[in-house]
Amino acid sequence: MPLLVVGSIALDSIETPHGKTEECLGGSAVYFSYAAHFFSNVRLVGVVGKDFPHNLKKIIHQKKNIDATGVQELEGKTFRWKGAYKGDMNVAETISVELNVFGEFKPVIPENFKDSKFIFLANGGPSLQKSVLDQIHSPHFTVVDTMNHWIKDQRNELLELIKDVDAIVLNDGEARLLTQETNLIKAGKMILKLGPKFVIIKKGEHGSILMSAKGYFIIPAYPTEYVKDPTGAGDSFAGGMMGYLAKTRDTSLQNLKRAIMYGTIVASFNIEDFSLNRFQQITFEDIESRVREFEEMLR
């Protein structure tokens, strides 16, 4: 089934204990698309400025199952993010953010994208995300991502949006901020009462929690020892999860558990190098091999 993602396309400058890179390809929609393309055709909607490098355009367009015709190019500069990771690299220190054309982004969904059945609303303003939903004819499964900024500054708009989606993905800090509850199980139950069928709480190196009215499912992170750059890990997790759901066309609780395992494995590859470098080196067979290894560990 067609899979649509709407989100940021960025030029990232990142420093970690293992090196640094300047203005490499990043952004929530980019990481999501590359993670999901191993499983399903992806329709990408985003915006770049006139300064967006030609070689990075080729990286986005080179995958035949990523349809980037929904990417707008506007006068001005591309969204830029500069950050650094230290110590255990669990949290990024944001050094600078330049929204540029992304700050004025009003997504226009191409007509041939409006029949998309699986929708991922990557991190962005709730009103922007709602405008995307309003343009889709009859979505089958919709997932929204958010962040602290929107929870604090556009809480009411976010609460209205959550009523209209099937699932929400957020990290442990965001779940606590949204509910004012420190216990994550209680927080997850409270978010379920806001409307979504599923709540997925990411806990970084400690894995994730899936919650529904039928109970909860906890999965650890894949124990990789080669963590080079965590940027995009959450969007890669979501891309692997949503890509698997679109591939299998099954959104049951049982299949969602398996989709989260695939998302976990895809994210474990992403963090092993900067930008999309690792994704450009692996195949679907590499993902399947690591899934089998992970399943054996869990047994």
Image: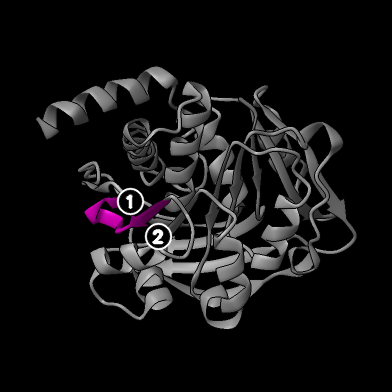
Q: Residue at x 24, y 63 (%)?
A: 185
Residue on which disc 2 sits: 192
Circles 2, 1 touching at the beta carbon (< 8 Å)? yes
Position of the C terminus, as image quadrant, is top left
In front of the other: 280 or 177: 177
Residue 240 on image: x %, y %? 45, 36
Confirm whether residue 91 shows in the render.
Answer: no
Q: Amino acid at mark 1?
A: Ala
Q: Main secondary structure of the magenta part?
A: strand
**Range of magenta residues:** 198-211
In front of the other: 177 or 238: 177
Q: Residue at x 67, y 59 (%)?
A: 129
Q: Residues within 10 Å of mark 1 (few under 14, many from 20)?
A: few
Q: Amino acid at mark 2?
A: Leu
In front of the other: 141 or 19: 141
Q: Residue at x 28, y 46 (%)?
A: 214
Residue on which disc 1 sits: 213
Considering only order in the chain, which callout, 1 or 2, is on the residue closer to the N terminus? 2
Is residue 73 found left or right of 232 in the rendered image? right
Is residue 206 found left or right of 204 in the rendered image? left
Q: Residue at x 60, y 36 (%)?
A: 140
